[in-house]
Amino acid sequence: MEGIGKPLAVYFERRMARILMLGIISGFPQMLIGSSLSLWLKEDGLDRSTIGWAGLIFAVYAFNFLWAPLVDRIRIPWLTNRIGHRRAWIVALQAVILASLVAWSTVDPVANLTAVIAVGLVIAIASATQDIVVDALRIEQIGTAEGESMAAAAATAVVGWFTGFKLGGAVAFEVAELFQRAGVADYWQSTFLVLGVVVILCNIGLMSAAQAEEQRRVAARLGLAGPTGESGTLAAVGAWFVATVGGPLLSFFRRNGFAIAAAVLGFIFLFKIGEAFLGRMSLVFYNEVGFSKTDIAIYSKGLGWVTTVAFTVLGGLFAIRMGLIRAMFLSGIGMAATNLLFAALAWTGRSELLFAVAVVMDDLTSAFATVTFVAFISMLVDRTYTATQYARRTIFAASSGMFVDWLGGAWGTFFVITTLMVIPSLLCLWAIRAKLRDMLAGTSVRLFGKEPAAA
């Protein structure tokens, strides 16, 4: 018990509560443009291909590194001086998300799909930008030498993210079901107004998240002449671009070498591609199999949240013990294999028991995979460029609906293919395993579970 008690105690530190709140703030908007938007479009009669292509709005998550340097540099008028640089950005972006929900409440997707997608894109841009700030603020809570704390912080962030995503989804589906049964014609539009209250509560909780005195750090790094860093000259703009955009990328390749840097980037972009394809179409699949919004809220969101919370914490502990590389291999294989349970559900038809088992196993392996993935990436970033180098990855899965249509609606075959999609990322990880051990030698990070933590 003593061996387990020490790493478990890390989760009860006050800063972990702050990281939990940051995770909730990060996860909730992705539920809006993922689960809620997909089911809204499905129930309003749009086809699978359209719903899948609507997922193109997630592309902004893959490119948010392009404007990540601006997050460090640009101050939010009035707010920055009162609540700090990072929190000012998050509050401003949360206001954009709240306004977008109000806009969604006035639009009919059948009559004006373009407007629905445009508002969803605004939410995606705000959320992707918010993730830059959230990840930077989360990483700055933990010291570079705190290996166990970094793993625990990754687990806590995942718990928070899934709390915002899954419990937020449970609230959305239950409220929508309630409005639908009450005879409200535009029940999804009314639901978005209720979800706006959640955004407001997140902003209140954000005030508990302490932040480092990063403004002085940013100013010193960028050489700002004044509090806003405005220059107005073309030379200054060019210098800023090289320092804040080219600098982090060159730093990453210079520190790690081309081969390992390319393999790491390949791993980052490929590790969860199968999960992304499944996730993009999961709500459509559940609806076509015959599950109601209440069923989805109970099993996929409610039960899924309990499973995720429990196994994320345990996953963080296992990752510490067995080492991040070994944990990523195990979790990647498990994450992909559980997709076969959804294939079985597609072949057998509606079964609440099989649905529950599939959801539990999927959330178990997904939580473990996410914890190890986040901890792994957190160890590799240059902390002076947290907002730039840790702009979170996302994977294109917009073609998933068209892919299911191309398969003739063969959901079972679709899920089998998503199972195989993890293989390229694991090959990348296998190719660089030895170099990673050399690169992180002397740190407190366990990669394979054999080497002792650095003193």
Image (tube, rainbow, N blue to C red):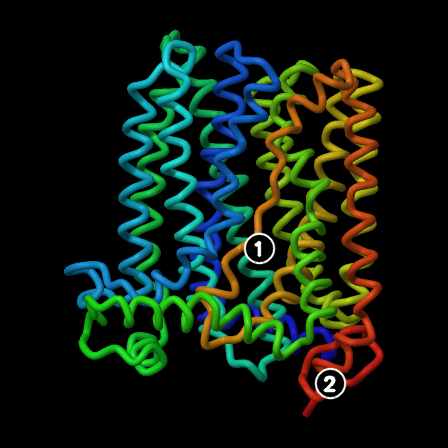
Q: What is the distance, in whole Å, between disc 2 and disc 1 at their CAs? A: 26 Å
Three-letter residue code for mark 2: Ala
Q: Position of residue 293 (x, y in %)?
A: 55, 21
Residue at 65 percent across and 74 percent down: it is 7
Q: Residue 89 appears in which quarter of the rendering?
A: bottom left
Residue at 28 percent across and 71 percent down: it is 236
Q: Is residue 233 above or below residue 56?
A: below
Q: Residue 278 appears in which quarter of the rendering?
A: top right
Closest to the observer, 388 or 277:
388
Residue 271, numbered circle: none
Residue 158, numbered circle: 1
Residue at 59 percent across and 17 percent down: it is 292
| 118 sits left or right of 103 in the view | right
| 260 sits left or right of 209 in the view | right
Reading the image, the residue beneath label 2 is 441
Q: For the residue carrying disc 1, how many other residues have a C-alpha within 10 Å: few (<14), some (14-19), or many (20+)?
A: many
Q: Is residue 333 above or below residue 294?
A: below
Residue at 81 percent across and 33 percent down: it is 417
Closest to the observer, 404 or 189:
404
Q: Position of residue 397 (x, y in %)?
A: 63, 35
Three-letter residue code for mark 1: Val
